[in-house]
């Protein structure tokens, strides 16, 4: 998913009321996941992270990567149900 599509999703989904309940849940899940991922990404360059055992650092790095992939899949699913504009 490219930056332009991500921004479109963020803009269009800011007012969730026009979406079906399961779509609203997906939008909320993506928003929450992205917030948790941002916190983890902010933690990774910290001194606390660097003081962790190498195995734990590896697990957190893999977790961040997987969370990013999960967010991408949610973004693709949301993009698929967004109304399309004709050129």
Image (cartoon, helix red, strand yellow):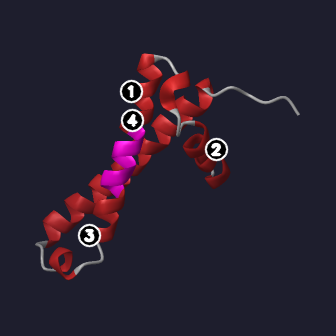
Mark closest to the chain's N terminus, 3 or 2: 2
Quickly name the residue at label 4: 28
- Residue 3: x and y, percent? 62, 54
Answer with mark 2 or mark 4, whichever residue precedes in sequence: 2
Q: From the viewer's perspective, is residue 13 above or below residue 59?
A: above
* Secondary structure under the numbered disc 3 in the rendered image: helix
Report the quarter where the C terminus lies. top right
Q: Which element is circle 2 on?
A: helix
How many circles with numbers are drawn on the protein? 4
Taking 66 as reference, is 25 above or below it? above
State the image coordinates of residue 85 (x, y, percent, origin top left). Answer: 79, 30
Q: Distance of mark 4 from mark 3, alpha carbons? A: 23 Å
Label 2 to label 1, Cα distance in Å?
A: 18 Å
What stretch of residues is rendered in magenta? 30-37
Asked whether the viewer can see residue 10, the reply is yes
Q: Sort mark 3 into few (<14), some (14-19) or many (20+) by Cα contacts within 10 Å.
A: some
Cα–Cα span, label 3 and label 2? 27 Å
Furthest-right residue in this view: 87
Q: Which residue is mark 2?
A: 8
SS category of the residue bearing label 4: helix
Residue assigned mark 3: 43
Q: Residue at x 27, y 53 (%)?
A: 63
Q: Nearer the viewer, residue 39 or 1?
A: 39
2 or 1: tag closer to the N-terminus: 2
């Amino acid at each position: 998913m490219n930056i332009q599509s991500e921004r479109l999703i963020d803009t269009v989904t800011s007012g969730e009321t026009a979406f079906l309940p399961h779509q609203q849940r997906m939008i909320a899940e993506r928003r929450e996941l992205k917030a948790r991922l941002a916190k983890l990404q902010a933690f990774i360059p910290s001194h606390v992270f660097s003081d962790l055992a190498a195995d734990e650092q590896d697990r957190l790095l893999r977790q961040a990567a997987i969370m990013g992939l999960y967010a991408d899949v949610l973004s693709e699913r949301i993009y698929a149900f967004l109304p399309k504009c004709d050129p």
